[in-house]
Image (tube, rainbow, N blue to C red):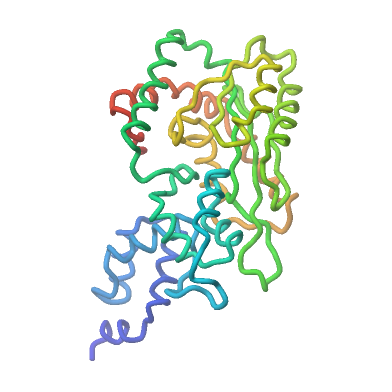
Amino acid sequence: MDADHELKMDLSRREIRVLLLHEFRMGRKATEAANNICSSRGEDILSIRTAQHWFNRFKNGNLELDDLPRPGKPLKVDVDLLKQLIEQDPRLTSRCLVEQLGCSHTVVEKHLNELDKKWRYGVWIPHELSPHQLQHRVDACMNLMTSHRNYQWLRNLITGDENSGQTGVATPKADLHPKKVMLSVWSGVNGIIHWELLPNGCTITAELYCQQLDRVAEKLKGKQDRIYYLHDNAKPHVAKSAYEKLLKLGWITIPYPPYSPDLAPADYHLFRSLYHHLREKNFDDENDVKMDIINFFGQKSQDFYESGILSLPERRRQVIDSSGAYISES
């Protein structure tokens, strides 16, 4: 029996998945990972298709390496509750959904797939947009392009958004999953205006969102005569109280088509960069998280923040030219 065959016989499926997780954490692609493992552990020990399957799970926040659900986890889930959770907060990672629903990653992923949801730009969105959704995206982009031919207004644009699951605060060893924190950020072409790290388990409500808007307005006082505001259509953002708050503040709200994180600078630019910065990091406490985020924001030049905002017209043009399809990121 040759050495390669012995390696194939000795490596369990779980050990192969450990190697895949290591390759994923090194930032490699699934195909490259499969080739690396096969070259060092034996040809045909792993298929590219299998590597792609596990990389997709890792990207969704599922780092479990076993086939079966963990002991004690139910095999069924309340699908209506799952739909409600991702509608209320489309930024909940699969891990957060597992914790809230009390079931396995396998079950959650199965039902998310049945609900036609995929994880992109840190948000659950449909696998395929309906003709109505595609047209809505085109119409929103066309309206903005025709009503704002002079792009100078972009320098008065403020974007607001929140993201959970970027990183974790270490917990006792008995708890294998660090607690996730939620970050709310408001920014413009000149950089970060205001940000908040919310306590573990805290969810954004309309009342809290209105309070946050007041704090952002205080930071902007005397700095801009006119404010254009872009946020997504999460339920707290479009609640009646939030709508009335924005009217009271005198901010001009920019239309945002549903399921369009590729048209939100916070998603396609700021959070995307922050994700790569925080990837696989865990911290001893929330103060360490805050210091790391402060350093991240501080290290970014004004050009970074400016490019995220000023690329918006070109991205809207791409959506129009592609009849509403999602923008393909390089």
Viewer-side residue, 103 vs 212: 103
Q: Residue at x 67, y 72 (%)?
A: 173
Viewer-side residue, 168 vs 323: 323
Position in image of residue 93 (x %, y %): 53, 53
Position in image of residue 68 (x %, y %): 45, 75
- How many marks the image carries: the answer is 0
Q: Residue at x 69, y 30 (%)?
A: 194
Residue at the bottom extreme, as displayed: 1
Position in image of residue 131 (x %, y %): 31, 33
Q: Locate residue 145: give its quadrant.
A: top left
Position in image of residue 75 (x %, y %): 49, 71
Viewer-side residue, 71 vs 291: 71
Of the 4 image quadrants, the one containing the N terminus is bottom left
Of the 4 image quadrants, the one containing the C terminus is top left
User: Is residue 77 positioned above or below 246 on the image?
Assistant: below
Viewer-side residue, 60 vs 7: 60
User: Is residue 84 positioned above or below 221 on the image?
Assistant: below
User: Is residue 264 positioned above or below 41 on the image?
Assistant: above
Quick check: 314 left or right of 321?
right
Quick check: 291 left or right of 149?
right
Q: Residue at x 38, y 77 (%)?
A: 13
Q: Locate residue 53: give its quadrant.
A: bottom left
Quick check: 26 left or right of 50?
right
Q: Residue at x 74, y 13 (%)?
A: 222
